[in-house]
Amino acid sequence: MKKILLATAATAAVLGATPALAQDAPAAPTGPRIEALVGYDRVKALGEHDGGVLFGVGAGYDFAVGNGVSLGADIEATDSTQKEGSAGAEVNSGRDLYAGGRVSFAVSPKANLYLKGGYTNARFKASDGVDTFGENFDGFRLGAGGQYNVGGKAYVGGEYRYSNYEAGLSRHQVALTVGTRF
């Protein structure tokens, strides 16, 4: 009988404390957002590596699914200054389009960390000095990052992402972001 009373008292204490714990947990990011990004883009093709400046815009929408957790949808359009070769024959990275999802975890009232993944389509252009040819490559992207609220609905962030495309193309990118939530 003592064991049943002890178990009941312990259960009541845990259940009674749960609302207090829920109030202390930071809120997950929610709602629409838009951001600008800039960073470093390193492309690997045919065993060769070369880097350039990454720049672009992104948008998304996050909705809370639990205590301090939200799910979101992302879209993004970026470009890069990355190119390989000389003026007579070179290969340039073109635009990169991305659509995917992410899961965010609030780590404080002002900061969250997230994981993302989705589809990406990149355009690469080759020039032989006379003609220019372009081709699109499909792939997937995985990434991780964080955001910090700097005031109101504005935030800054950082992100690492890896993209893998068909034909043995891949890229590693590090991006800094500045954005706002609505």
Image (cartoon, rainbow, N blue to C red):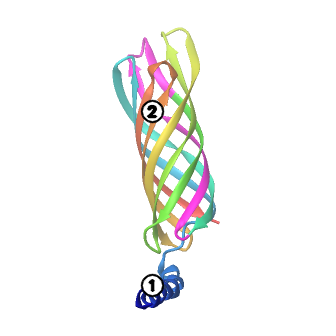
The span shown in magenta is: 67-93
Residue type, label 2 = Thr
Q: Position of residue 102 (x, y in %)?
A: 55, 51
Q: Is residue 84 magenta?
A: yes
103 or 180: nearer the viewer = 103
Q: Identify the residue at horizontal 46%, vertical 40% (top origin).
A: 54
Q: Is residue 117 above or below residue 167?
A: below
- Could you say which quadrant of the image residue 63 lies in? bottom right
69 or 72: nearer the viewer = 69
Report helix, strand or loop for mark 1: helix
Q: Is residue 85 above or below residue 176?
A: above
Report helix, strand or loop for mark 2: loop
Residue 81: which disc?
2
Asked if labels 1 and 2 touch by Cβ distance under 8 angstroms, the answer is no
| Helix, strand or loop: magenta stretch | strand
- The quadrant of the picture occupied by the C terminus is bottom right
- The quadrant of the picture occupied by the N terminus is bottom left
- Could you say which quadrant of the image residue 148 lies in? bottom left
Q: Identify the residue at horizontal 51%, vertical 22% (top origin).
A: 166
Decide: few, some or many residues near mark 1? Use Cα within 10 Å; few <14, some 14-19, many ≥20.
Answer: few
CA gap, disc 2 to disc 1? 65 Å
Residue 7: which disc?
1
Decide: few, some or many residues near mark 2? Use Cα within 10 Å; few <14, some 14-19, many ≥20.
Answer: some
Task: Work out whether mark 2 precedes mark 1 in sequence or the reverse, and give the earlier one.
Answer: 1
Q: Is residue 92 above or below residue 146?
A: above
Q: Position of residue 109 (x, y in %)?
A: 47, 75
169 or 24: nearer the viewer = 24
61 or 21: nearer the viewer = 21
Q: Is residue 11 magenta?
A: no
Residue type, label 1 = Ala
